[in-house]
Image (cartoon, helix red, strand yellow):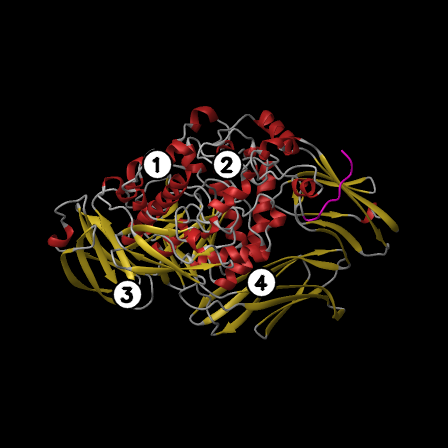
Amino acid sequence: MKDIAATVPGCVHTDLLAAGIIDDPYLDGNETAVAWIGRTDWEYATTFTHSLDDDRADLVCAGLDTVATVLLNGVELGRTYNQHRGYRFDARAALRDGDNELRVRFDSAYSYAEAQQKRLGDRPNAYPEPFNFIRKTACNFGWDWGPTLVTAGIWQPIGLQTWRTARIASVRPQTTVTDGQGKIELRVRVERAAPGPLEVSATVAGSTSTVTLTGDEAVLTVTVDDPELWWPAGYGDQPLYDVSVRLASTSLPEQTLDDWTGRAGFRTVRVDTADGAFTLHVNDVPVFVRGVNWIPDDVFADRITRDRLHARFRQALDANVNYLRVWGGGRYESSEFYDLADELGLMVGQDFLFACAAYPEEEPFATEVAAEARENVVRLAAHPSLMMWTGNNENIWGHADWDWIPDLGDRSWGAGFYFDLLPAIVAEEDPGAFYWPGSPWSGRDDRHPNDPAYGTMHIWDVWNTDDYPKYREYRPRFVAEFGYQAPPTFSTLRRALSDEPLASDSPGMRAHQKATDGDKKLQRGLDAHLPAPRDFDDWHYLTQLNQARALSLGIEHFRSLRPHCMGAIMWQLNDCWPVTSWAAVDGDGHRKPLWYALRRSFAPRLLTVQPRDGVPALVAVNDSGESWALDVALSRRTLEGVVLSSSTVGVTVAPGSATTVPIPTAIGTPADPAAELLLAEADDQRAWWFWAEDKDLAWPPARFTATVDGDAVTVTAGTALRDLTLHPDRLDPAAWADEAGVTLLPGESTTFRVLGAGPLDPTALTTRPVLRCVNDLSGT
């Protein structure tokens, strides 16, 4: 292959795409056509000029993906085996005065991983790929929502750094708050080129601490009186304090040898695990975790900009999410990611990077894991948004439940990492931080790791084998994963797929469904709840609706159990490419109907109807810091809206609690389950209860009028309209509606605002398939 231009930071795939050598692997079935890239060796080369002097000169590689040999003027500076850490090489002996040539050769990740697999013996794995034998983003090797695109390249900045006497190697700020006094302890490590005393000073909020350093490490403490506390979004503000560290020689204190700047926030974090609980406390306030799992937002990391992260974080916050769990099959997220989380008040839990497999603990992995963990803990420890570290994703559960033990024999599987190495590094580098060995984990070896009565759990039988009402059979303490699939938005499908006609089983759709028997599971869910789709447009609307309903049912059930259950982290917020998946926001950044359902079900104050002892009951959930008093109008009605029985119930909910109120028998007991509904209304919230599934309900064929005035689409119901949803992206990919899944009774109206686009055709905007409801499938 001829030489092609390379962008750094970047990767081979995006360079080949920019050069026109490959087709976009996200489109149609192109993914398989570029599989050769991951099995090919690559080389990056550049030239630069340098003037030799007496300074130290280091080649600093913030991130190489993954198995690389670094050569400067033909001299090997070193080799790398880990995408998740940086490397620094002494370049003095290889540098020339004038022109220099740098080459970075990347061996195939497959070749390396398969060689380690052969050397150490295979280990159980959820997917037929060797991702557990290389320290690289696991989901590059494919997942049940991700493509197999095994990257290579200089994925983080690279450059030459010159210095003399000494430099700051790392700074780890650690904040504490006690009796209104804030302290920030800074562990400063230095690298020396010459002996002699050094002066290290740290400044926070106008206060400075200075020490004389004769070794390689200094600890400085700066006190801040009455610091403003950092709070999660919805609980308070997010003040951040600038932190600066300066390194100088004591003989020339006015000359700075090196400096470091960062930010820190003052807050306390603890997790109560007594008696099986898993309750997060921030500044001594118990917080119900309204969470989402986070995967890499793009397979190709160089395309994830700060603006893109900000947009995704805003989507999370606007859906009333307060917590992001960074999943262990992806990456240690960027400093920009954590800076934004700090600024916006999004709490974060960071998994160490192990997922769904047994991992070898032999060398070189033991050394590499220790190095990557130490580097990233130091890098992230100061961020007030970071709530906890978790040792792995599903590996302890896999070892207990997935028939690994007979295959493993006496081979290592990662336990030494999760129970010994990683907690020791966290204790040393981020003292006081909360560490949990795995997700899920029940807190003790003598318990099943996914026991709902203890610690954290994952619920996947709902998607894999059971219907989603089974969520209500669980009484978990904290749910760290649960989810249900649906295709992406129509505009994303049409951009990514050239299938004609587009169908649920057309070639492109099959190529973008990665879950085992995923379409069969989607169909099982439709068959259980909804009318049979007549065409692809029906199938698309109904599968997205079923996803939204499944997650709403689960979230509202878990929240109704507060304080027994104190967290629900749904799988997943985002996608890395256009795919049928569990995401609320698809690979093009478009909101699926699930996103709107999250916004309702994660509202800080929630009104919901839940089954209690076989009959519906009213539950009011109050995550706010103030008491919530409401008068709830309850009614049992026909599907035509006729009131059969009604009453008003007064409810008062204390801050941070849930209150359950019985519903009067005359309202909670139907005469005809297929023809009636229950409605609870208060404070602009509506909670619905149906005694039968839509496929069995006697919905009248939908009748309504719709008018368009600028960006406003107003719909007035002639009959009841179930889960009325507007899909303006079918007319313009940039268009989206401010609401979805609205149920109206006869005579009621709702107005959708169409955002992100100019004027759209009014007729198309107010008819099928753009404007949909469940009962537009009735009577046809």
Q: CA distance from mark 1 to mark 3?
A: 36 Å
Q: Are marks 1 and 3 in contact (CB under 8 Å)?
A: no
SS at circle 2: loop
Question: Distance between the Cα atoms at labels 2 and 1?
Answer: 23 Å
Please provide percent x and percent y for residue 575. Answer: 50, 45
For the N terminus, which image quadrant? top right
- Residue on which disc 4 sits: 186
Mark nearest the camera among 1 and 3 is: 3
Taking the magenta stretch, the answer to whether it contains residue 5 is yes
For mark 3, what is the residue?
683
Q: Which residue carries the number 1 mark?
A: 461
Other-residue count near label 3 (Cα within 10 Å), few / some / many at <14 / 14–19 / ≥20? few
Say which element carries label 4. Answer: strand
Q: Is residue 50 visible?
A: yes
For the C terminus, the quadrant is: top left
In the image, what residue type sits under mark 1?
Answer: Asp
Mark number displayed over residue 512: 2
**Taken as a whole, is the magenta stretch helix, strand or loop?**
loop
The nearer-to-camera label among 2 and 4 is 2
Which mark lies nearer to you, 1 or 4? 1
Which of the pair 414/188 is nearer the observer? 414
Hey, what amino acid is under mark 4? Leu
**Is residue 446 visible in this depiction of the protein?**
no
Q: CA distance from mark 1 to mark 4?
A: 46 Å
Read off the magenta span. 1-9
Question: Quick one: label 3 or label 2, which is nearer the N terminus?
Answer: 2
Q: CA distance from mark 3 to mark 2?
A: 42 Å
Q: Is residue 589 above or below residue 128?
A: below
> Label 1's element?
helix
Mark 4 crowdedness (10 Å alpha carbons): few <14, some 14-19, many ≥20:
many
Chain-order first, disc 2 or disc 1: 1
